[in-house]
Image (cartoon, grey):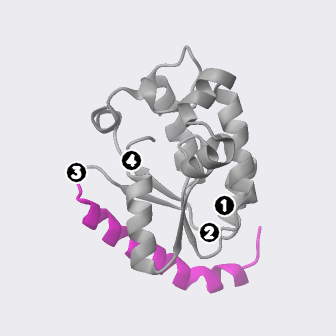
Amino acid sequence: MPGSGKSTLGVLLAKAAALGFVDTDLLIQSQTGSTLQAIVDGEGYQALRRIEEQVLCSLDVTGQVIATGGSAVYSDRAMRHLKQNSIVVFLDISLTAVRQRIGDFSLRGISKRPDQSLEDLFAERYELYTRYADVIIQGEHKSQNQVLEELLKVTAEIQRDLPALHKQPHS
């Protein structure tokens, strides 16, 4: 969700792990010459989702920490691309924390239906976030450093276990 810390923690994780960093919201803005909010206002929320899918599917995810937009999970194609060669992390915070961190969400370029409340959006996305996540990190009531340490530990464990996972027969 917006305000979960994707961009901030993404930069910190990339620095700590000596990886590249990509913020797909910034890529979208750079490629379109528009802010996310301008895209939503001018073309609609589904246009933003289509653009986001194109950007995500064109990324080489190897050696990168990628902070996706919160609506990336609406594209099964994009999520399959990300999961193919990377670890998908869901930074889990409550709706209350989202409200506190983002303030006026109408200015954030959030891809949501015009009639959709933040509560409904949160519930809809939560199910998708948990479906696609390889790792769920509780981000609320923790410092950035605490979340970063947890991210480093969990991703190192998963990377260590990847060769064994690839040798297992698929069902």
Instruction: Where is residue 54? Give x, y as percent.
Output: 75, 48
As drawn, 165 above or below 107: below
| Eye-nearest disc, 3 or 4 | 4
* Marker disc for residue 82: 1
Q: Earlier in the sequence, mark 3 or mark 4?
A: 4
Q: Earlier in the sequence, mark 2 or mark 3?
A: 2
Quadrant assignment, res 111: top right
- Alpha carbon distance from label 2 to label 3: 27 Å
Q: Earlier in the sequence, mark 3 or mark 1?
A: 1
Q: Residue at x 71, y 41 (%)?
A: 51
Name the residue tied to disc 3: 141
* Marker disc for residue 86: 2
Query: Decide: marks 1, 2 in contact (CB < 8 A)?
Result: yes
- Alpha carbon distance from label 3 to label 4: 12 Å
Q: Residue at x 66, y 60 (%)?
A: 82
Q: Does the rendering let one see residue 77?
A: yes
